[in-house]
Amino acid sequence: QVQLVESGGDLVQPGGSLRLSCGASGTIFRINAMGWYRQAPGKQRELVATISGGKIKYADSVKGRFTISRDIAKNTVYLQMTSLKPEDTAVYYCNADIQMTWGTTSIDSWGQGTQVTVSS
């Protein structure tokens, strides 16, 4: 079993900053990719940023404001968010593509989410 736990969500004013973190634990052989998604009330879940090896991808809406990084040794991914806007308000979910053991197929794992609220 694999568990992803997010932290760092908070209430901040527009223009503020937050740093989200997500740690993976459990039976892990390797993590192929990690990323962040978000879902606002009444909206579909959307990709925020992903990191896989040296490849990083950002949603256009956060490009230049958010930075994703990963500590491979700690099985942890971070999302540094700056210049936050009310439109960034959402539950942010950690995602990881995890191979649990050698020779097995990787699985897509999700955390429970952490609330980010941007409001004045």
Image (cartoon, rainbow, N blue to C red):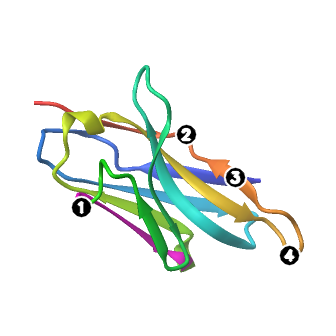
Mark before the other along the chain sequence, 2 or 1 = 1
Mark sitting on residue 108: 3
Q: Quadrant of residue 106?
A: bottom right
Circle nearer the N terminus (3, 1): 1
Query: Alpha-carbon distance for marks 3 and 1?
Result: 27 Å
- Residue at mark 2: 112
Q: Is residue 64 left or right of residue 90?
A: left
Determine whether label 1 and label 4 are within 8 Å by CB: no
Residue 64's mark?
1
Residue 94 pos. (x, y %): 52, 50
What range is drawn magenta here? 64-72
Among numbered discs 1 and 4, the one appearing first in the sequence: 1
Question: Disc 3 residue type?
Answer: Asp
Quick one: which residue is furthest to the top in this view? 42
Q: Kindly report which numbered mark, 2 or 3, lies closer to the viewer in this rendering.
A: 3
Amino acid type of the residue that numbered disc 2 sits on in the rendered structure:
Gln
